[in-house]
Image: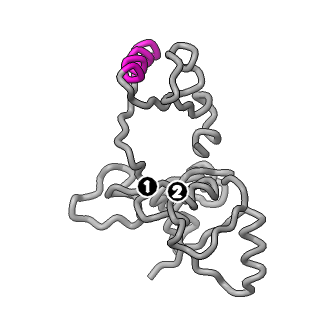
Amino acid sequence: GTVAMRCPSNGAAHALLRMAGIPVAAPSANTSGRPSPTTAQHVIDDLFGKIPYIIDGGNCQVGLESTIVLPHESENSVTLLRPGGITVEDLYTVCEKVYLDQALQGRLQSDAQPLAPGMKYRHYAPKSPMTGVVGEDRNVRSFFTQKLKNGFGVLCFDEDVPFLPESDKLITLGGKREYDKQAQD
């Protein structure tokens, strides 16, 4: 068997654990298959009436899914099963070797069972369908402009906004290199 441990950095979570005085078993604060919440309001929107209490500890510092690793007893190494807020580079600061799971390399057989959630099936997915757009900035912005004119929502970077028509369906993720901000949104 395996054991998963959450290591919260939030002060409210630490206070709850101290008050409990015993180990606490707790699932994620979201319905299975839904994106991880980064605010108490996200939890309320998803779980109101399904759970008795919601503690508002402020916004999450990292809005990515949990990093999941499989430690190896025989050597100072881990296999990264699911990437998250703790990067491969972070893992190398405490491990001699970091292996990537087959699911991360796209080599998982169709009948194989993934070792971590979110690595094979629809998982942590938004409710609305989304399309990723990659290309030269001018072509991407032209595509976004057309979609906005047709009533679609557009999720873009701050750098794109001056080139797009004003719209209440335009949402920005922050700058192209503001990875921490993007992860929280």
x, y (%) of residue 181?
64, 39
* Quarter occupied by residue 177: top right
How dense is the environment of label 2, judged by Cα within 10 Å: few (below 14), some, or many (20 and up)?
A: many
Query: What residue sits right under mark 1 in the picture?
Result: 124
N-terminal label among 1 and 2: 2
Say if residue 58 shows up in the picture: yes
x, y (%) of residue 36?
52, 56
Q: Report, in whole angstroms, how far the alpha carbon at label 1 lies from the one at label 2.
A: 7 Å
Tell me the number on the disc at residue 146: none
Q: Amino acid at mark 2?
A: Ser
Q: Amino acid at mark 1?
A: Tyr
x, y (%) of residue 39?
63, 54
Q: Is residue 2 magenta?
A: no
Tell me the number on the disc at residue 36: 2
Q: Secondary structure at mark 1?
A: loop
Q: Residue furthest left?
A: 111
Is the residue under label 2 in contact with that under label 1 (CB below 8 Å)? yes
Q: Secondary structure at mark 2?
A: loop
Is 157 situated above or below 9? above
Say if residue 97 shows up in the picture: no
- The residues colored magenta run 135-149
User: Main structural element of the magenta stretch: helix, strand or loop?
Assistant: helix
Q: Residue at x 72, y 56 (%)?
A: 58
Comparing 147 with 107, the one in front is: 147
